[in-house]
């Protein structure tokens, strides 16, 4: 693995975490096209559902595990930090289910990680701060 969850959570800002995860439009092409059914089948397996719950709890329901970036969307994704391939799924390689290769992201962040574009600029314009939606609490 080139990147890891353990390394990701040492990065202090949302923008820098996003930069760390960004794939610059390079999606694992083997997970798409005619073999996409294998990729999608994975996400319906009991082991994946269990892993998904573990990641949501571990990351406190926050986008890229950034405190104060709660995901208010039931379609939150568990993203593979290092993209997986069909071969990884077929051969049941550990990278598919390794918690150190998984992070919770919002649908918008997931798309931006993979494809970039306009959404990235909107997401990164304002760095969130603790209590920024509750100014009376200070901070």
Image (cartoon, grey):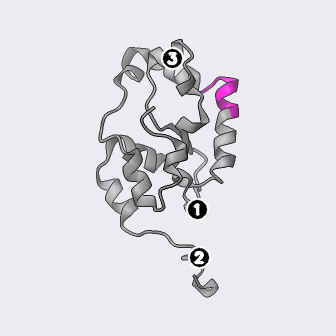
Question: Visible in this render: residue 26?
Answer: yes
Q: Is label 3 in a helix, a strand or a loop?
A: helix
Spatial CA distance of label 2 from label 1 is 11 Å
Between circles 2 and 3, the one closer to the viewer is 2
- x then y, percent, for residue 112: 37, 47
Tell me the crowding category of disc 1: few under 14, some 14 to 19, or many 20 or more residues within 10 angstroms, Cα based.
some
Please state the total of marks drawn on the protein image: 3
Q: Is residue 42 above or below residue 62?
A: above
- x then y, percent, for residue 115: 33, 42
Left/right placement of residue 75 relative to residue 33 reads: right
| Rendered image quadrant of residue 96 | top right
Question: Visible in this render: residue 37?
Answer: no
Judging by the rendered image, the residue that carries numbered circle 2 is 131
Spatial CA distance of label 1 from label 3 is 33 Å
Q: Is label 1 in a helix, a strand or a loop?
A: loop
Judging by the rendered image, the residue that carries numbered circle 1 is 67
Tell me the crowding category of disc 2: few under 14, some 14 to 19, or many 20 or more residues within 10 angstroms, Cα based.
few
- x then y, percent, for residue 121: 32, 60
- x then y, percent, for residue 10: 51, 54
Spatial CA distance of label 2 from label 3 is 43 Å
Q: Which residues are magenta?
A: 43-50
The residue sitting at the top extreme is: 91
Q: Is label 2 in a helix, a strand or a loop?
A: loop
Q: Is residue 27 above or below residue 30?
A: below
Q: Name the mark on residue 40.
A: none
Left/right placement of residue 95 relative to residue 24 reads: right
Quadrant of the drawing holding the C terminus: bottom right
Q: Are marks 2 and 1 in contact (CB under 8 Å)?
A: no
Left/right placement of residue 134 relative to residue 53 reads: left
Judging by the rendered image, the residue that carries numbered circle 3 is 38
Q: Residue at x 29, y 50 (%)?
A: 117
């Amino acid at each position: 693995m080139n990147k890891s969850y353990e390394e990701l959570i040492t990065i202090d800002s949302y923008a820098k975490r996003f930069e760390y995860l960004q794939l610059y439009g390079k999606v694992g092409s083997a997970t798409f096209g005619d073999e996409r059914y294998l990729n999608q089948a994975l996400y319906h397996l009991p082991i994946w559902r269990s892993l998904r719950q573990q990641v949501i709890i571990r990351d406190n329901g926050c986008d890229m595990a950034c405190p104060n970036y709660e995901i208010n969307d039931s379609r939150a994704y568990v993203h593979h930090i290092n993209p997986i391939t069909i071969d990884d799924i077929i051969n049941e390689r550990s990278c598919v289910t390794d918690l150190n290769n998984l992070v919770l992201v919002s649908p918008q962040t997931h798309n931006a990680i993979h494809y970039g574009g306009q959404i990235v600029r909107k997401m990164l314009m304002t760095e969130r701060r603790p209590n920024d939606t509750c100014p009376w609490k200070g901070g």
